[in-house]
Amino acid sequence: MFDLGWTELLLIGIVALIVVGPKDLPGMFQALGKFVGKAKGMARDFSRAMNDAADQSGVGDLQKSFRAASNPMKTAMNEVKKTTDGVTRDIDEATRLPLDPERQAAADKIREKSAEMANARLAAEAEAEEKAKAEAQAAPADTATETATAAPADDSADDKAENKAENKAKNKAKNKA
């Protein structure tokens, strides 16, 4: 900006110390700092306003078209790349071989088991939620808060034991199938 080095800044500081005096020097630097801060803020606001005006007037679109015009090879290569990517994807999909009937049957069986497990888990979660709602409605509000504050660890231990038992039952059912 002003291209001042350390020696020039030191000289300005010494002259300011002599002219202003050591007593008023901190106040002067504070006022100078506020002035510089305001000037930077005004410059930032002006630059932001100019950028907004340029965006609204469509200068960005012109800039893109000028860049494309100044480097037509790059623009053409981008279009070629887009086209080849699409063709490559289509070829990959067309050349993908179907699974052997045995492997297809195994894949279908895996999908069915996954769907069954997901449905069982969702049903168990819904049942647990309904059970919790029923318990909350059955117990009076006072006893529910006393129970919750008195022994929260016991409730979580019971829930963990129930979940463990449900998981064991599901695993046994899976192994049998």
Image (cartoon, rainbow, N blue to C red):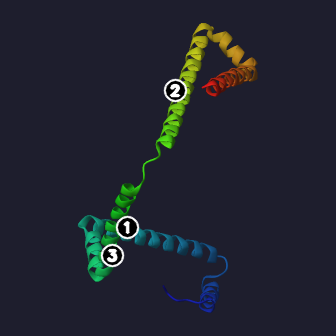
Instruction: Read off the residue under disc 1.
Output: 48
Foreground disc of the pair 1, 2 = 2
Taking 57 as reference, is 174 left or right?
right
Measure the C-alpha gap from mark 1 to mark 2.
55 Å
Percent x, y of residue 91: 36, 60
The amino acid at mark 1 is Arg
Of residues 109 and 44, the one nearer the viewer is 109
- With respect to residue 52, does 147 lie above or below? above
Of residues 26 and 117, the one nearer the viewer is 117
The amino acid at mark 2 is Asn
Foreground disc of the pair 1, 3 = 3
Tell me the residue at 59%/90% (across/down): 5
Other-residue count near label 2 (Cα within 10 Å), few / some / many at <14 / 14–19 / ≥20: few
**Going from the N terminus, do you reach mark 1 or mark 3 first?**
1
Instruction: Read off the residue under disc 2.
Output: 119
Instruction: Read off the residue under disc 3.
Output: 77
Quarter of the image with the C terminus is: top right
Measure the C-alpha gap from mark 1 to mark 3.
34 Å
